Each structure stands twice: as C-alpha cells, then as structure tokens.
Image: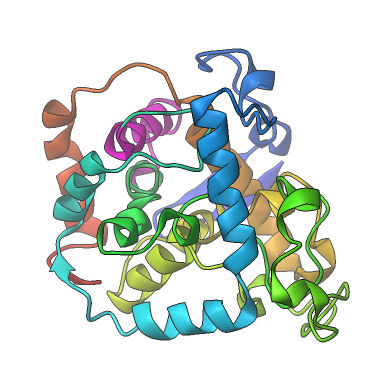
Amino acid sequence: MTAIATNQTVKILDVSELMRPEESFASKPVGRYRDYSVDKNDPIKERVRITYTDMHTNQTVDFVKRKMDDWCKFNKFEATVMEALDYLDNLVDESDPDVDIPNIVHAYQTAERIRKDHPDLDWFHLVGLIHDLGKVMALKGEPQWCVVGDTFPVGCAWGKSIVYRDTTFDNNPDTRNKKYNTKLGIYSENCGLDKILMSWGHDEYLYRVLEHNNSKIPKEGHYMIKYHSFYPWHSGGDYQHLCTEEDKKMKKWILEFNKYDLYTKGGEMPDIEKLKPYYQSLIDKYIPGVLKW
C-alpha cells in the first residue's frame, strides 16, 4: 500500500489496483485500443499515420523552443475553462485511432467514470474533464500534428516504443544531429522530467496555462495533465534513465488516470448540459474566472 497526499486529504491506494486495466468499462476488448497498424484502405488509420508522420518529421529541439516561446506568452486569447471546453465541440483528434467524435464528448466520458470510481477526489474529476483542453491550439491555427498524439522528448535518441518509430523519423533533422541522437543527448542521468524538452502538444501547453493562471489542482493532477500522452515512458518503458524518484512515484497516478482516458472512449454518451453545473462548481473551486491562454 502507498499513501499519496493531496491538498484535501490522504488517500490510501493499493498499487496493484492502480495498475490494473479496467476491462469492466472498456467499450471493446482492451487489446483493440491504440491499434496503430497500417492500413491505407482504412481512412481513420491512414489519417492517424499521416498525422504521426508529420509530427515525427517536424518536432525538433528548435521547433519546440519556438512553440514554447510563442504560446507561453499567454497572449493568444482569454476564456473561462467552460468556454474553452465548448471549443472542443469542434475538434476531432486526427491522431486517435479509437474515436471519431468531438473531443468534448471524450472529456465528459473520462470525467464521469473517474467520478464514479473516485467520488471523494473532486480535483481528479476535474482533471478528467480538462485534460485535453490544450487542444484549443488546433482551433487557433496550429496543425494537429503539433497539438495531439503521443508525446516524446526531443534532444535525445527516439524511444523504441514510440508509435511508427521505425518509419517516420527519417526526415527529422535531429535524427542525424550528434548532439541529439544519443541515449542522453542534451540531458543527464536522472535529471528529471521537468528538465526535458517534450515534443510540443496539448499536454505541455495546458500544464503551463494552469501554472500561469495559479491553478489550485494538486501536483498529482498537474503531472497527469503534463504527461498523460507520454506513452513511451509511462506505458512503453522508455526514458526511465531520465526520471527522478518523484517522477517514478507520480507515474502511478498517471497510469491511474490513463485507464479512464483510454478505456472510456466509445462508452456511454454523457448528457453534457445536465453535467455542466457540477463541473462548473469544480472549475470555480480550482481554476476560477477568465484565464489567459
């Protein structure tokens, strides 16, 4: 057993339960999620492959630094969390092989299942709702390949478990840069994930928006938001040599979150209007008012 502190209480969690896939609420066999096999006759699979090819070609150290400098001025627009959520009604994630519906539906599906299983952790419900809010970048002019999909470090060798790894990085200039193509690259052993430049996307952006706007969501929730798409680490086993002990501890929370993020796709359709008052109360508690994006 392990005790994890939040700003509300201390929750005792069984680590084996944290790690268990939730087959009970998956809408299809667990093994059929995250199917990245190539089939050019399947329009969704081909859409996904093209998105990742563009991502893996263009996400370089220099590109990430430019995007961070651009978006982390927080001068793009102002909106409440609920207003930003409504934007997601216009977005279908082109990197996701499991859904072909607006992202706002997935947000409420994730949040409601977390709420059912963790009724006392209201901040966790809110994390489920907002975890993809950084995708508003795609509605503000960014191509989806630098907004959605799995994330990975730039500035070091590509992890072996990155999807399409062997076929999509050939045209990325960092692949041939000796500063960036070794195991450690520009980093040091156990330097910590907070010292790593991640490929630019919705995880990093929302994390930084929340920090900038003084979010009261506890650290566990911020970790979930920042690294929930970092599948090569939390599910693929890569990049362990860059982690601190705190990163390893927080990984359990990310895995707990990810079973809801993944296995609720295609589940029950939520009544969004009916649910809004409850989630507005959580927004008012943890990230109230108009935010700078």
Residue 20: quadrant of the picture: top right
Residue 182: horizontal and vertical position, in percent?
Answer: 88, 76
Residue 47: horizontal and vertical position, in percent?
Answer: 51, 38
Left or right of 88 on screen, residue 178: right
Quadrant placement of the C terminus: bottom left
Residue furthest to the front in view is 41
Quadrant placement of the N terminus: top right
Residue at image location 44% in from the left, 58% down from the top? 147
Q: Judge whether residue 200 can be spotted in this image.
A: yes
User: Which color mode does the image show?
Assistant: rainbow
State whether the magenta stretch is mostly helix, strand or loop.
helix
Residue 129: horizontal and vertical position, in percent?
Answer: 33, 43
Left or right of 257 on screen, residue 88: left
Up-down relation of residue 262 to residue 205 (above or below): above
Residue 79 magenta-drawn? no
For the image, the number of numbered tags is 0
Residue at image location 33% in from the left, 65% down from the top? 216
The answer to which of 10 and 159 lies nearer the viewer is: 159
Residue 12: quadrant of the picture: top right
Q: Which residues are magenta?
A: 102-122
Residue 110 magenta-drawn? yes
Residue 72: horizontal and vertical position, in percent?
Answer: 37, 81
Residue at image location 72% in from the left, 54% down from the top? 233
Residue at image location 69% in from the left, 69% down from the top? 172
Q: Judge whether residue 150 can be spotted in this image.
A: no
